[in-house]
Structure formats: C-alpha cells, structure tokens
Image: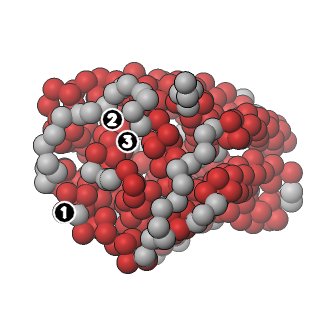
Amino acid sequence: MEKNPAPLFLAEHILSMTAYWVCTGPVLAKLTEYLALPLGVSNMITQLTSTLLMLQLVGGAWYGRTRHRRRYLMASNLTWRVCLALTCFTVLLPQGAGGMAMAVLFLGAQVAFQLCSPAQTAWEINAVDGKVGASFYTRRETWFMVVYTLFMCGAELLVALAGTNTELQRSFVWIGGIITLLLIAATRLLPRLPDPEAAGPAMPLRALAGPLRSPVFRRVVTAGTLWNLANVFVGSLSNLYAVRILEMDFFAVMLWSTLGNVLRAAFTPPAARMAERMGWRKTLTVYIALALVLAIGWWRITPDTAAVLYPVLTLLGSIPVGGLTLGLFRLQVQHSPAATRSVYFSANSAVSGTVCLVGASVCSALIDAIDRGSLAFGINSLFLVGTALMAATILSVWRLPQSKSDT
C-alpha cells in the first residue's frame, strides 16, 4: 500500500515556511536599520515578498513545460534557501558592503522562491489529493502558525535584548543560524517526497492567459490582488512604521507580534467553521471589514499613543490574516483544474505581483518624498490609501460566487 505523503509535505512546509517568514517583518525592518539603508529602499526590500509574485507566472510556465520536474523543484528550492540562509550573516561585513550584499541575497531568495512556489504548491496539492481529510489545509495553516510564532518570538527576543550594535550584530548571526538549521531540516525531507506528476504535452504559451479567461477565477484573482495591494499600504508598511517612525521598543514589538500570531493561529479554524455555515464570501467580508477599521487606527497612531494603540492594532490585526489567507487559497483551489493548477496559481500571482510591484514603488517613492520634506502630509496618510483599497476589496469579494467551504 502506498504511504500517505501528507505528513512529510506538512513537515517540510512548516519548517521551510517558518524559516522564510522569520526573515521578514520586524526582524527584516530592524536588519535594514542596522545596515543603515535609506527608508525608501528599506520599504522596497520589506515589500519583496509580495511585489515579486509576478515571477510565479514564469515559474508556473517553466514547470509546466519542463520534463525534469524533480530537478526543477530541487534546484529552485536549494537556491532560495541558500540565499535566505546567508541574508542575516551580511551583518558580518562592513556596513556599506553588508547592506548591498543583504539586498542582493534577499532579492535572490525572493526571485528563486517565487519561481519555485507554484511548482511546490502543485506538487503538494496533487500528491495529497484524495489522501487527506477536508481539514488538511486548515490544520496546516494552524500548525504552521504555532511553530512560526515560537521561532519568530525567539528571533525578535534576540533583537530586543541587544543593547549595543555589537550585541545586535551577534543577534542577527544567531537568527541566521536558526534559519539555516530550519532550512537544512526542511531540505533533508525533499528527497523523501514522492515524484511530482509527469509533465503532460508541452503547454503552448498562449495557455498562460487561459486562467484569466475564466470569469469566476478572474473574480478570485481580482479580490486577492486588491487585498494584497491594500496590504502594501497597511500590513507591510506597519512593520517599518513601528520600527523606524514610531521607534517602538523592540521588546514591545516582539511581545505583541508574538501574541498576535497566537491569535492568528487560534482564529484560523473558526474562520473555516464560519465558512462552512455562511460561505467564504461572507466570511471574507467580515474579516476584511475588521482589517479596514484597524487600518484607520494605523492612520491615527502617533508616538504618544503607540503604547496603547500598537498592542490593540497588532493583536486585532492578526485575526483576519489567517482566515483571509486560507479563504483565498481555497477559492483558488476550488476554481482551478488539477491538471493545470500550477498555471492558474501562477496567473493569480503574476497579476497580484505586478500590481503590488507598482504599488510598492509608488509607496516607496512617496515615503522618500515625505522623508525629504517634499510633501506636506505624513507617512501615516499612506494608511488611508490602504483603507480605500480594503473597501474596494469588500466590493470585489461580493462579486464572488457564494459557496460552502470545502476546507
């Protein structure tokens, strides 16, 4: 009897994604500050996890046409993991060289990760299809958040306890070591995973536009793209804003972001249960409405009110993320055929990434202009842009077909 590969895929996903996301958020924002990168450049770097999504279209097409699928998966996985593992060690270089090396390595990790992502997703979904229960992806998201929260808490605590630049440098080296160990453990599992499905007939390039010709899938893409674009001006910006503008004590950032991640893990299963009763359309609307209210809170926060508002915004802001991530993912799975799923996922990411790249470029240019005093309004005004985009996301979600959750 063929062994169920789901536990191996689950373990590999949790380990690799924990390492990936530990090297983002407040830790990455603090790393750019340590390396004295300009505020606009720092914003572009912290936004790379969403702005390079368009490369997934290239990755999906490449994977769909290659006859050496396992080789492609191994090479792309190894590339992004090596680059990411080295990112934090750039603090050992002189500041100028370290900043440049960090930017190049993190960019390289993101490029390889996005090229790998649709193939990795299709590999897992097709391998476990029919072999797991309906709650598999809910459990995956929940357990990932538990493990990620523990490691992120440890990484942020290392930064928070650093009192001098020398101690901060040592903290980043320790974080780099933790990320490296997680990635080694995850990579050791890759050879034990089953072979991906054999490639079918070579896919014509015009087929890449096929997913966007599906009216229902196009609506899913629109909703996800608007949500990701809104987070360029809220979610990603808030980490940089807290560290570089509000100058929050990093121990407070660590404490509240850790508790926020606990809430995210706790509220992901209820989101799936809510969707079973009322469908993903209404569930997503409720969660986005909460995120919209919190975006207004980020607009109003100041250094004087940060001690009170930052915990509230961070804790409550974590609640919608898990449900929205799960819901948008399940909608993509539901409305994409198994045979060409990597192409559908790639098309979604390409549209979202292209739009987010433009949004992040505009956001960074505005931050630079505000930082130089060229514009009259403050950086906090950018949160209002995110608020408006979240309102547009709600309208887009209501155009989705109403259906019950199958998670």
Query: Residue placed at 42% from the left, 66% from the top?
Result: 350
Is the Cβ of the residue at disc 3 closer than 8 Å to that at disc 2?
A: yes
Q: Position of residue 69 (x, y in %)?
A: 61, 57
Alpha carbons under labels 3 and 1: distance apart:
21 Å
Image x and y of residue 267, in percent: 35, 25
Q: Could you say where residue 383 lies in the image, as x and y percent from the top left?
A: 35, 54
Q: Left of 2 or right of it: where is 380?
A: left
Badge nearest the viewer, 3 or 1: 1
Q: Is residue 34 left or right of residue 128?
A: right
Provide the residue designation for mark 1.
215
Query: Given the current orientation, which residue lies at the most extreme front position?
Result: 1
Q: Could you tell me which residue is drawn at 75 percent across and 66 percent down?
A: 100
Residue 224: name its quadrant.
bottom left
Q: Secondary structure at mark 2?
A: helix
Amino acid under label 3? Thr
In the image, taking residue 106 as reference, residue 172 lies left or right, namely right
Question: Which residue was labeled with disc 3?
Answer: 325
Rounded to the nearest whole Å, what is the CA distance between mark 3 and mark 2?
6 Å
Instruction: Describe the element under mark 3 as helix, strand or loop.
Output: helix
User: Can you tell which of label 1 and label 2 is closer to the viewer?
Assistant: 1
**Residue at the spot of label 2:** 323
Residue 107 seen in render: yes
Amino acid type, residue under disc 1 in the picture: Pro
Seen in the picture, residue 124 relative to 265 is either above or below; the reply is: below
Q: Nearer the viewer, residue 159 or 110?
A: 110
Q: Which residue is painted at 50% across and 40% down in the image?
A: 127
Task: Tell me the crowding category of disc 1: few under 14, some 14 to 19, or many 20 or more residues within 10 angstroms, Cα based.
Answer: few
